Image: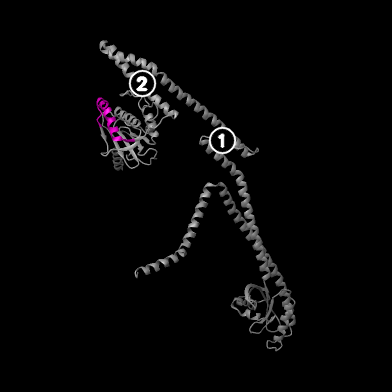
Amino acid sequence: MVRIDPIIVQVRRFSRLRPQRLIPHTAGRRLRRFYAYARRQWRRSLQFRVVGITLLLSAILVSAFGYTVASLISQGVLTTQVNTSRERIQRGAGEAARQLEGYTQADDPGLPGKMRVVATDLSSSMDVPDSEVILLRHNSSLAAASPDTGAAAVMQQPSMRKLRESIVGSSRPGIYQQIETLDVGQGPTRFLVLGTPILTGGEPLELYYLLPLKAENDLVEFVALVVTATGVALVALLALIAATMTRLVVKPVRVAARTAQRLSAGLLDQRMQVKGEDDLARLAAAFNQMAANLQRQIVRLEEMSRLQRRFTSDVSHELRTPLTTVRMAADLLFASREDFDPAAARSAELLQAELDRFEDLLTDLLEISRFDAGFAALDAEPTDLAPVVRRVAERLESLSERCGVPLSVQTPPDGAIAEVDPRRVERVLRNLLGNAIEHGEGKPVVMTLAIDEAAVAVTVRDHGVGLKTGEEKLVFNRFWRADPSRARQTGGTGLGLSISLEDARLHGGWLEAWGAPGKGAQFRLTLPVRSGDRLVSSPLRLVPDDARADEAALIGETP
């Protein structure tokens, strides 16, 4: 218990501190979420971008306009006050010089009293509230102020030294001014300070007017408030107008986008609503016309495709009956070929072989017609593909021996169990291995099986003529041949790889090809281990290791 108590205390301390430490993190997360939301809206919404740009530009323009207006008004008010005050101090200086004209001696005992009287008279003649009038002597501390609030002391402050030096050092009378914040007994106040020398018969005096700028400051602040409120209202109004106008344009575009998505999903009867006769109405009408034309073309193509599939299916079925009759006659001739002369016997053998190929062609056509009609069904069941691979290799062993192609099979020792349709997988592998033997040029052919947690793959590698660039896609086309002049060894129909590709897609798998001239080719079949799963990778590489090694060696030798 003694060891647990400190830990409990520390935990309680941390629990008390946690909310305080999480506040900045919470604010940061909210800021990041808002930033992410704004970026997402900026990328996706045209209306959001237009309103945002309008807000930014209008705020800049209104701010510049408001600043200019406020500055001009402030400068105008201050200029008016300065001009009026200069006239006041000029009249006051003349009046003070007239009243002090008889006081020519600096030590005249009546001078201080007369200065106070002059200051009082000048102050009473002004109609500016809270203003101050100050009379000073150049080289003494004698001063007079009206009203007697101790305002004369502020002229001794360092901030007023420059103004006094300008007045004392002037060679001729003039009016000098300065705006300064002073405390004359009513708290810090912004004053317009004007000063001028007074030339009497004796020592020169200094006359100062301290005029408060409170009314001017209030006026400027009121103007700034009005300009700011007007600017904010104007920016908000511009944003509202931009949002409304943008919505009028963007809404039909969004409707067109949704209608196009429905059309691409197969709902060919979807149309836009046409309102008015403006540009957007013409856009909607043109879109509807395009959709109608597209619908007619798609329906026409579907009808043609349906007729083509029906024709293929009907022809294939109708040929079954005469083919059966021809097959019976051909079997009879083939069984009696030993009683014929050599030429007739050879003809019976050729007839038998071509009938076999014709039956395979009919079977493939029927299978293709089922794929085209969407009637092909997958009978998936857990199957070990290792025996399937070996069985396909055994059935084509005689063909490989006849073509002089060495055949080898590599399977995992524990097998490869997957949910597949074994009949379709065996057909795919039979087609791939037959093509590899036919194009192997007497070189080895290797069939490899591998499996991982999600997929099972089979590769068929030959070292024959290979494929040119771009032929790895064409090889799955119907009746396509890389070399039309090349004689078939197995009597194929030209539909084997096309059917194999459809079988792979029916499983949700891949059938891919790689090839290079003179380096052979490799076909890879990849199927999901569990039926219905989505493939993301294959346990076997599409490009063979020996081809990758040759490419790496070639790159290493290149200077």
Q: Is residue 218 left or right of residue 520?
A: right
- List x then y, in percent, for residue 478: 40, 27
Whether residue 293 is visible to the viewer of this picture, yes or no, is: yes
Question: Which residue in the protein does label 1 denote?
Answer: 270
Kind of residue sitting beneath label 2: Glu
Whether residue 525 is visible to the viewer of this picture, yes or no, is: no
User: Considering the numbered disc 2 on the image, is that residue within a helix, a strand or a loop?
Assistant: helix
Kind of residue sitting beneath label 1: Gln
Residue 170, above or below 140: above
Residue at 61% x, 35% y: name it: 285
Most frequent secondary structure within the magenta stretch: helix
Q: Is residue 405 magenta?
A: yes
Q: Is residue 192 magenta?
A: no
Magenta segment: 382-407
The quadrant where residue 1 appears: bottom left
- List x then y, in percent, for residue 425: 34, 32
Disc assigned to residue 359: 2
Is the residue marked by circle 2 packed among few (<14), some (14-19), or many (20+) residues within 10 Å? some
Residue at 35% x, 35% y: name it: 381
